[in-house]
Image (cartoon, rainbow, N blue to C red):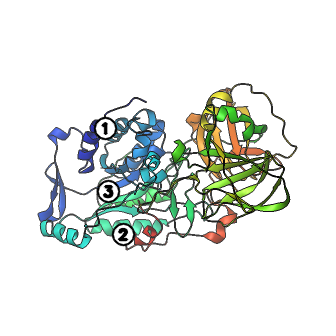
C-alpha cells in the first residue's frame, strides 16, 4: 500500500466525472447536443442504456464475468462510484492494488465493449460505510460533514442553470431494478413486469437510462453502510438488490426480460446465454470451540490498552471499523441486581456486556435497554462494542462509534476506562493457523466466542452459500477472508455468499472461523447450500416491498428511505 500524491488522483477522476470514458479518447468525441435534446457519440446520435455495478462489492477475479454478462444483456455502458474510504484508508496513504485497482477495472470495462459513467464522489452514499467518506475525518470531533454554504439558494441556482441550458437529453441516472435490505426487515423485491414496463416507456421517449443496480454484489467485511429512519438501520451483508444479475453473478428472469426490451430499441450482442456459475453443497459441518474472545486479548490488541478517565470513541483511538473492548473494574461489591445502562443513546452500535468473562446481555443503539448486574469488588466489567456500519445517507451525519457516554451502574457514573482496539482480522489470518493453547471454558459458552472447522473439498469446487442455522449474530471468515456479518436471529439474510475462488480444491484443507457474539446453538453446525436464503420467515411481518409505479421515470418513494 504505497502512498501516492493526491494531485494524481484528482487529475484522473475529475475529467472522468464529467463525461463518458471512451477508449482512445483522443480520436473520439462525446457531445451534449442541447439543440436537439440528445447526445452525440463520434458525431452520431447516441443514447446509453447503462447498469450500475460497484467494483468494490465484487472481487477482482469476477469483474470480467459480471461485465460480459452486462454487455450480453444489451447494455452499452456501466455506471459506478469511487469510494474515497476504499482508496485512502489513512490520511495521505492510497491503495489502488488488487480489488482496488481502478485502472484495471476500467480496462476490463473496455474489453467488454462498455462505456463508463464514473461518479467519483467524494460522497457516494451507495449504502456503503459512511457513504464513502473515510472515518478518519471524524478524528476531528467538531467536524461538520456534508454541509454547504448557507448563502446557496437552490432555486436561484436552477434558474441560472435553465438560463444557459433550456434544453438537453432526457436522462434517468438511477432507475431502480430492486431495493436494498436492512437487518430486521424483509428482503426487498421489485417485479419483473414493473421494471421492464418502466424501462420500455423511458426508451420510447428516447431517454438514456442507468439501471441501479444491475449487479449488486456483497458488502464483505465491515463495509456495509446504515440509514437512520426514526432509528438506526444497518444494511445487510448481501447487496443482492433483487438485481437482474444475482449476488452470485447468475442471470435472472429479470435480466432476460430486460434484454428483450432493450432489443426493441438497439442491437444486443449475439451469442449463447451466459450460464449460471457451478454451485456446491457440503455439510453439515460441526464447528469446534477455539476459545472466548477475552482469552486472546493480548493477540487482538498487542499494543495494550489505552487508558482514559472517560470512554473514548473508535475514532479517537483510530479504530476505523470492527470491534473495541472497553474494560472497567467494580469498585465495590454489588449484591443485588443493579441497573446498568448507557445514557443519551450512547451505545454505537451494539454492546456485549460481560462480568468476569460471563456474558450478561446486549445494549443496543436506539433501544432503552438496561441490564441487571451483580459482582464483587474488583470484578472485571468488559463491554465489547460492535460498529455496525456508519450512516451512509443524510447531511452532517457524523456517526461516531463506541461508547459515546460513560456507562452508569446504579447511581454511579463509571470512570477510569481501558480501551482495547481489536485487530480481529489479523488474529484470524495470522495467529489462528498456529496451534494456540486451549483456554478453559464453561460447558455452555456464551458471549463473544471463536469457533472453527477445517475441512477438505473432495469433489469439484463451486460457488456456495454458507448457512448458519441456530446461530445468533457474528462475523465469519473463510480461509482468512472476511465474508461479513451474519445475524441469523434478526434476518432477513440467512446465508452468506462464498465465491468459489475462496475455497481450496482437490482435498486441501479449508478453514472456517466464526466469531459468535451472543449465543451458540446446541449443535454448532454450518452448511454450504447451492441456493441463497435472503428472506427468513421470522421477518415476514416487517415487509418492505418496493412498489414503484411502472410508469414513473424517477424513484421518489424509495428515496424517502435512502439515497445513492
Specify the label residue 49 is tagged with.
3
Q: Which sits earlier in the primary sequence, circle 2 or circle 1? A: 1
How far across and down, in percent of the image, does residue 255 sit?
A: 45, 56
How far across and down, in percent of the image, does residue 227 sit?
A: 51, 62
Q: Which residue is drawn at 25% across and 70% down?
A: 153
Q: Which sits earlier in the primary sequence, circle 3 or circle 1? A: 1
- Say left or right for 33 vs 94: left
Mark 2 vs mark 1, foreground winner is 1
Mark 2 vs mark 3, foreground winner is 2
Q: Which sits earlier in the primary sequence, circle 2 or circle 3? A: 3
Mark 1, secondary structure of its residue:
helix
How far across and down, in percent of the image, does residue 195 sit?
A: 43, 66
Q: Inspect this view and state whether residue 144 appears.
A: yes
Nearer to me, 386 or 501: 386
Specify the label residue 6 is tagged with.
1
- Residue 137 versus residue 338 in the image, above or below: above
Q: Which residue is drawn at 21% across and 63% down?
A: 169
How far across and down, in percent of the image, does residue 87 sit?
A: 41, 40
Mark 2, secondary structure of its residue:
loop
Q: In which quarter of the image is residue 434?
A: top right
- Determine the CA span between mark 2 and mark 3: 16 Å
Tags 2 and 3 in contact by the CB under 8 Å rule? no
Q: The N terminus is located in which quarter?
A: top left
Mark 3, secondary structure of its residue:
strand
Specify the label residue 554 is tagged with.
2
Q: In which quarter of the image is residue 124?
A: bottom left
Amino acid at each position: 500500500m504505497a502512498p501516492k500524491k493526491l494531485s494524481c488522483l484528482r487529475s484522473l477522476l475529475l475529467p472522468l466525472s464529467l463525461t463518458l470514458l471512451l477508449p482512445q479518447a483522443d480520436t473520439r468525441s462525446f457531445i451534449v447536443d442541447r439543440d436537439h435534446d440528445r447526445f452525440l457519440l463520434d458525431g452520431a446520435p447516441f443514447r446509453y442504456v447503462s447498469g450500475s455495478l460497484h467494483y468494490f462489492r465484487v472481487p477482482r477475479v469476477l469483474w470480467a464475468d459480471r461485465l460480459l454478462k452486462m454487455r450480453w444483456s444489451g447494455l452499452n455502458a456501466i455506471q459506478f462510484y469511487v469510494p474515497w474510504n476504499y482508496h485512502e484508508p489513512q490520511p495521505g496513504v492510497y491503495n489502488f492494488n488488487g480489488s482496488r485497482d481502478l485502472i484495471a477495472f476500467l480496462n476490463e470495462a473496455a474489453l467488454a465493449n462498455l462505456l463508463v459513467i464514473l461518479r467519483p464522489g467524494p460522497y457516494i452514499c451507495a449504502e456503503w460505510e459512511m457513504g464513502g467518506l473515510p472515518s478518519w475525518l471524524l478524528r476531528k470531533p467538531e467536524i461538520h460533514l456534508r454541509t454547504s454554504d448557507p448563502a446557496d439558494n437552490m432555486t436561484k441556482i436552477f434558474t441560472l442553470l435553465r438560463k444557459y441550458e433550456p434544453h438537453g437529453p432526457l436522462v434517468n441516472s438511477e432507475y431502480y431494478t430492486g431495493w436494498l435490505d436492512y437487518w430486521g426487515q424483509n428482503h426487498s423485491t421489485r417485479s419483473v413486469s414493473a421494471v421492464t414496463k418502466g424501462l420500455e416507456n423511458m426508451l420510447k421517449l428516447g431517454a438514456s437510462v442507468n439501471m441501479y443496480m444491475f449487479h449488486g454484489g456483497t458488502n464483505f467485511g465491515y463495509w456495509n453502510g446504515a440509514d437512520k429512519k426514526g432509528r438506526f438501520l444497518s444494511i445487510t451483508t448481501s447487496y443482492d438488490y433483487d438485481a437482474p444479475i444475482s449476488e452470485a453473478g447468475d442471470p435472472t428472469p429479470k435480466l432476460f426480460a430486460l434484454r428483450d426490451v432493450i432489443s426493441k430499441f438497439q442491437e444486443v450482442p449475439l451469442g449463447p446465454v451466459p450460464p449460471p456459475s457451478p454451485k456446491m453443497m457440503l455439510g453439515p459441518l460441526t464447528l469446534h470451540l477455539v476459545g472466548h474472545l477475552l482469552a486472546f486479548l493480548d493477540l487482538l490488541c498487542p499494543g495494550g490498552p489505552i487508558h482514559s478517565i472517560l470512554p473514548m470513541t473508535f475514532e479517537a483511538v483510530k479504530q476505523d471499523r470492527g470491534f473495541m473492548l472497553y474494560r472497567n473494574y467494580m469498585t465495590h461489591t454489588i449484591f443485588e441486581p443493579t441497573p446498568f445502562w448507557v445514557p443519551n443513546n450512547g451505545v454505537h452500535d451494539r454492546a456485549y456486556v460481560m462480568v468476569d468473562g460471563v456474558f450478561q446481555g446486549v445494549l443496543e443503539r436506539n433501544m432503552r435497554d438496561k441490564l441487571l448486574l451483580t459482582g464483587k469488588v474488583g470484578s472485571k466489567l468488559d463491554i465489547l462494542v460492535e460498529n455496525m456500519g456508519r450512516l451512509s445517507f443524510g447531511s452532517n451525519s457524523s456517526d461516531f462509534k463506541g461508547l459515546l457516554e460513560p456507562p452508569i451502574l446504579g447511581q454511579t457514573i463509571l470512570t477510569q476506562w481501558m480501551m482495547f482496539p481489536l485487530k480481529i482480522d489479523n488474529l484470524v489470518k495470522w495467529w489462528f493457523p498456529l496451534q494456540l493453547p486451549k483456554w478453559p471454558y464453561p460447558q455452555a459458552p456464551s458471549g463473544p466466542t471463536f469457533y472453527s472447522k477445517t475441512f477438505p473439498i473432495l469433489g469439484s469446487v463451486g460457488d456456495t452459500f454458507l448457512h448458519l442455522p441456530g446461530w445468533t449474530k457474528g462475523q465469519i471468515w473463510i480461509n482468512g477472508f472476511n465474508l461479513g456479518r451474519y445475524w441469523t436471529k434478526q434476518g432477513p439474510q440467512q446465508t452468506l455468499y462464498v465465491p468459489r475462488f475462496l475455497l481450496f480444491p482437490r482435498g486441501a484443507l479449508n478453514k472456517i472461523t466464526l466469531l459468535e457474539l451472543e449465543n451458540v446453538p446446541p449443535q454448532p453446525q454450518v452448511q454450504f447450500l447451492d441456493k441463497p436464503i435472503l428472506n427468513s420467515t421470522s421477518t415476514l411481518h416487517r415487509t418492505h416491498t418496493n412498489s414503484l409505479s411502472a410508469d414513473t421515470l424517477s424513484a421518489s418513494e424509495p428515496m424517502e428511505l435512502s439515497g445513492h
